[in-house]
Image (cartoon, rainbow, N blue to C red):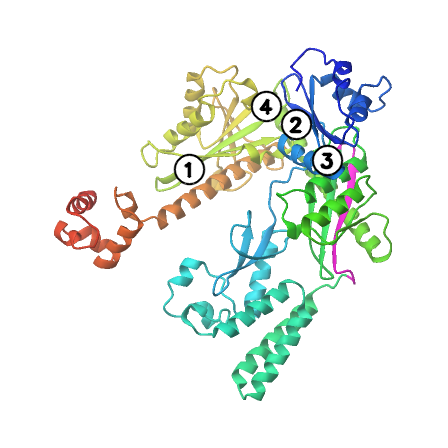
Amino acid sequence: MENNQTVFDHKAFLANVTHQSGVYRMYDEQQQVIYVGKAKDLNKRLASYFRRDVPSVKTRALVQQIRAIDVTITHTEGEALILENNYIKKYQPKYNILLRDDKSYPYIVITAHRHPKLGAHRGGKRVKGEYFGPFPSAGAVWDSLRLMQKLFPIRQCEDSYYRARSRPCLQYQLKRCSAPCVDKISEQDYQQQVHLARLFLQGKNEQVISTLVESMERASDKLAFEQAARYRDQIATLRKVQEKQFVSGTTAELDVIGFARIKNQACLHILFIRDRMVLGSKSFYPLIPSASSDEEIVSAFVTQHYLGEDVNQGNIAKEIILPCAIDNSVQLQHLLSKQVGYEVKIASNVRSERKRYLTLANTNADNALQVKNSHKESMQARFRELNNEFELNKPIERIECFDISHTMGQQTVASCVVFNPDGPLKSDYRRYNVHGITPGDDYAAMSFALNKRYGKVKDDDKLPDIVFIDGGKGQLARAEQFFADLDLPHSPLLIGVAKGESRKPGLETLIMAGSHQLINLPATSPALHLVQHIRDESHRFAIAGHRAKRAKAAKKSTLEDIPGIGAKKRQALLKYLGGLQEVKNASVDQLMQVPGISQQLAKTIRDFFN
């Protein structure tokens, strides 16, 4: 790679560049990757950037910032496409079109246990089993699981609960589980139900019904009328489900990508069609450089969304419909087919049913972009209104709000939420586990949170314009004292948000730092609505953290805090002595009778509880 220099000597560089295919990376003065591209002929492609008559504004701006370029040669164009995709995901260059979607799709999984479990899953596929999906949201997964619980009596409980059963649980009484944990169903019958659930998740409803009909007839021939009645009820429930389902058309498996664009904003909306039904949909909002064409955006999206080792193979349909033609569609078809092990077709010029799907996807993309912009414009209007209320010299770019949550002083958690003119900036949200203070001291907890957030801040860009403190004059005064003791380039505007009478929304009082002047905005004020939104979000974020911490503490055994007591010894103590209370009251001699507990360890346990 070339050394950092004021002006990039492209002529000297191009004199030594190969004519083979490969991938190139361009760097700026800070040695940051600003663009990644691929080429069939690296020399010709890179030379095209430095012509005098480059028409693209984006390319000219890019060339002005280039200080170094390095290249990686590949054997084929397909390899170059894969490597380019990997580099874009790794470096996130600002001049590339970037797909920023960090959320993984939720799936339904049938585990590979002796008695398989039916459950929801999100993230890496570490659990052995079969995965079905993707589903557009977690809600869709849970709705499907609730439905399947009525159709197929397969366990949905956690493994720890399943192993600990000695008698059937309530789900068995409700006929939503066949209780394989206590052998209330034979292995063969349970595996048959698992097989039927698998077929149902694959969309093969008619095959499920046919199998159930055959099983009902066999049970009836054997005079097993109770079992035949169960099959009959399953068939009836499935028939009702079929009546409620919307059969979209005749095409079995499609991903239809809609596209909409407003200036430098774009939305791509995918319709997931599996087994002739619209399974769900999802919108994506890629970050695009100016002067990018629609074809470039669609091409970059398809490549990043479908190609690579980090992509769940079950996401890829056998046919992908695009809103416009892209140059590398043939290469992508070949690479995707090779990646998933079956033929994948990419098409754009479609007719009939596929065209109706594409129109629907485009309409959804346009609507999603309009809604997003509407929300953004509303948020920006609220920021302007808040700026006018406080008569600030410059526009508000960043607001942070702090809140404290605890239960009678225990498991105290502080939250910090961040808003900018586009809305909540969730990537900058932070929670702080408060410790080292007197339980229930909200003032000390606020100081702890502020110190965690601003105690080591030196960069002026990281400071907000406004800091809201959820609380009255006491919390605000503590925040004022904290910032007064800090040596910051500039202190943010501090405002306390006190709840109004009866804690009703619209009656909040704002308390200005310094003068402690009280400001009561009208209940219809957009500025007050913004303050309420920020305050409620900080409250929600703090409570969620506190509840998670409290739930974790509730599951934790006191014995875990004793040095030298591991999981096996805890289990032995509880089993041998009969419970935690008996362990607390046991003498040293009684503790020594527990297998694995020495005299020294028995004294340690006794001293811990006394």
Task: Work out whether mark 2 precedes mark 4 in sequence or the reverse, and give the earlier one.
Answer: 2
| 459 vs 278: above or below | above
Name the amino acid, label 1: Val
Q: Which residue is mark 3?
A: 75
**Residue 229: x percent and y percent?**
56, 81
Q: Which residues are magenta?
A: 249-264
Name the amino acid, label 3: His
State left or right for residue 424 relative to residue 305: left
Quarter holding the C terminus is: top left
**Residue 53: x percent and y percent?**
87, 19
Q: Which mark is residue 384?
A: 2
Task: Work out whether mark 4 precedes mark 1 in sequence or the reverse, and give the earlier one.
Answer: 4
Secondary structure character of the magenta stretch overall: strand
Q: Nearer the viewer, mark 1 or mark 3?
A: 3
Task: Work out whether mark 3 precedes mark 4 in sequence or the reverse, and give the earlier one.
Answer: 3
Residue 578 visible somewhere in the drawing:
no
